[in-house]
Image (spheres, rainbow, N blue to C red):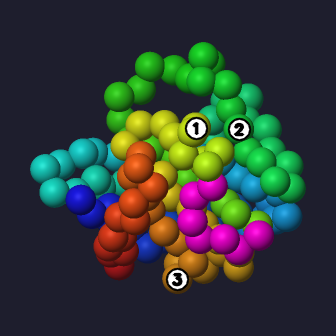
Amino acid sequence: MELSIGESLLGSMCDFAVEQHPHEIILLLRGKVGREAIAIDDFLVPPMAVSGVRFAEFPLHVLPIDFSIVGTAHSHPSGALSPSVGDLNNFYSRVMMIMAHPYTIANVAAFNARGERISIRVSH
């Protein structure tokens, strides 16, 4: 499985993480799931999301029914580019992206529900 995302969209996500640093951010990823790839085409801030220096969360029960949500993205102000146990225990949908400080495209990784890394293809 591969994740594809546009460079400008990924850049916007990283910019948001920079603006909120040192707090974490949490985003919902919208896109399409294909046979070989998940294509991300939009993101949104979940309703009632809260965050702090070491966490970002949102209540699942307030999410609208939206079948285009294919996963989440969140930042790690610590710079760690791997999911924590808490990240894996709160996995939502099909993919999780992590943007690690200093929030450049080179510091982004994607994972499946088992915590295995998924390759990311960034299109221009």
| Helix, strand or loop under label 3 | helix
Mark number displayed over residue 106: 3
Q: Amino acid at mark 2?
A: Glu
Q: Secondary structure at mark 1?
A: loop
Foreground tag (3 vs 1): 1
Q: Which residue is mark 1?
A: 90
Mark 3 and mark 1 lie on one chain; the one further toward the N terminus is 1
What numbered label is drawn on residue 57?
A: 2
Question: Alpha carbon of mark 3 to alpha carbon of mark 1: how far?
Answer: 25 Å
Q: What is the span of residues highlighted in magenta in the rendered image? A: 78-84
The x, y position of residue 7, in whole percent, is 43, 73
Depth check, front residue: 92 or 49: 92
What amino acid type should be assigned to the residue bearing mark 1?
A: Asn
- At a point 13% along the width and 50% down the height, the residue shown is 35
> Which x, y percent locates residue 112?
39, 52
Query: Does the magenta portion include 52?
Result: no
For image coordinates 24% across by 45% down, the residue present is: 33
- Front-most of 41 and 4? 4
